[in-house]
């Protein structure tokens, strides 16, 4: 396995913070323009996944460029880290902090192909391998820290259900909110038993807050400019009732990303305990350093 070429000058926070946003700059896949390609990759990946948390660029690990053709391309091996901002959080990415090691840090290793199209840096393909720190690393560095659980853990999901019911009962909002998705589940064994710590996103519905229990499943989420989302953190200690805190965001005019000028494809390996970088598209056999991200296996042959 080849050693990765670490470009230390590009990993400093100062450099990342100074990535240019000048739309008049003509991108030509040159090495001194890697910051433009990195910014395009970071934005594109965050704009095109619809689950979990926002990811922030950490380091450029490798690059390979073809500057000979009119449609030049550069293949970047980059590292991203999960932030504490869920995708429903309107906070700008530069204000989101990456997750601490004690919270089981999640890292994404990506190969991204960036083209120069009409003078702009355009993402054509990406493949990411997203995974959390191993449990052994967490135990070594923080033996008392909670560990991640799969997002479908039945006991934890029961605590989410109870926490959401409590929020709807006690909140001062007029609408009923329903579960959008579970973002993270962690657990810890204490003298009181098994504790659960859950983060989940919620969405406002067309039902009033006092809607009857038997009618809650029929409540529909509001869409477009009317949509209000929230992000909740709940904790359940032993057999006690869950505690829950939710932050509700103002209605946002959430639209799909602008139409991409070129066809693109993306692929990510999905661990069971975290949401991946999306979208869920067919495998993308990106070119790039084979020691950075392994391409997905070929599909099975069709049955006769």
Image (cartoon, rainbow, N blue to C red):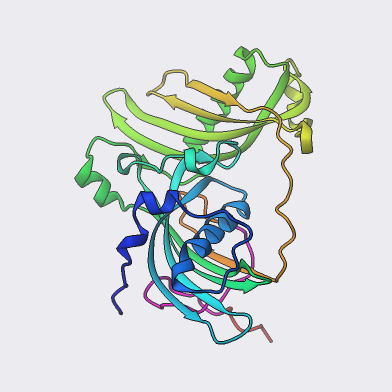
State left or right for residue 133 relative to residue 27: left
Residue that appears at 63% across and 83% down: 70
State left or right for residue 183 relative to residue 177: left
Q: Nearer the viewer, residue 232 or 156?
A: 232
Q: Give the x, y percent position of residue 43.
A: 57, 54
User: Principal SS element in the magenta part?
Assistant: loop
Give the answer, above or below, for where 221 lies relative to 248: below
Quarter placement of the C terminus: bottom right
State left or right for residue 178 relative to residue 10: right
Give the answer, above or below, for where 215 lies relative to 97: above
Whether residue 296 is visible, yes or no, is: no
The range drawn in magenta is 278-298
Q: Residue furthest left?
A: 140
Asked where in the image residue 212 lies, by quadrant, the reply is top right
Quarter placement of the N terminus: bottom left
Give the answer, above or below, for where 157 lies relative to 296: above
Q: Give the x, y percent position of residue 246.
A: 55, 24
Residue that appears at 45% across and 43% down: 83
The mark tally for this picture is 0
Q: Give the x, y percent position of residue 286.
A: 53, 76
Confirm whether the magenta stretch covers residue 219: no
Q: Give the x, y percent position of residue 153.
A: 48, 42
């Amino acid at each position: 396995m080849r050693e990765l070429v670490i470009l230390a000058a590009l990993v400093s926070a100062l450099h990342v913070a100074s990535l240019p946003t000048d739309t008049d700059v003509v991108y030509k896949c040159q090495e001194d323009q890697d910051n433009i390609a990195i910014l395009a990759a970071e934005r594109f990946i965050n704009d095109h996944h619809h689950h979990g948390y926002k990811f922030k660029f950490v380091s450029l690990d490798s690059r390979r460029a073809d500057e000979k053709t009119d449609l030049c391309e550069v293949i970047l091996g980059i590292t991203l880290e999960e932030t504490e901002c869920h995708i429903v959080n309107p906070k700008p990415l530069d204000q989101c902090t990456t997750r601490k090691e004690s919270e089981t840090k999640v890292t994404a290793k990506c190969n991204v192909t960036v083209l120069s199209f009409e003078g702009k840096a355009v993402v054509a393909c990406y493949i990411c391998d997203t995974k959390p720190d191993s449990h052994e690393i967490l135990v070594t560095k923080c033996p008392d820290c909670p560990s991640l659980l799969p997002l479908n853990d039945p006991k934890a999901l029961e605590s989410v259900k109870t926490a959401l019911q409590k929020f709807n009962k006690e909140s001062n909002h007029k609408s009923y909110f329903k579960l959008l998705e579970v973002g993270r589940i962690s657990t810890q064994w204490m003298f009181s038993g098994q504790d659960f710590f859950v983060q989940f996103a919620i969405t406002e519905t067309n039902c009033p807050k006092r809607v009857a229990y038997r009618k809650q499943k029929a409540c529909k989420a509001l869409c477009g400019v009317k949509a209000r989302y929230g992000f909740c953190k709940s904790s359940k200690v032993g057999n006690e009732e869950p505690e829950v805190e939710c932050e509700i965001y103002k209605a946002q005019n959430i639209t799909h990303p602008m139409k991409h000028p070129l066809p693109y494809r993306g692929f990510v390996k999905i661990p069971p305990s975290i949401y991946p970088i999306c979208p869920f598209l067919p495998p993308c056999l990106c070119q790039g350093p084979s020691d950075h991200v392994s391409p997905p296996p070929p599909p099975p042959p069709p049955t006769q």
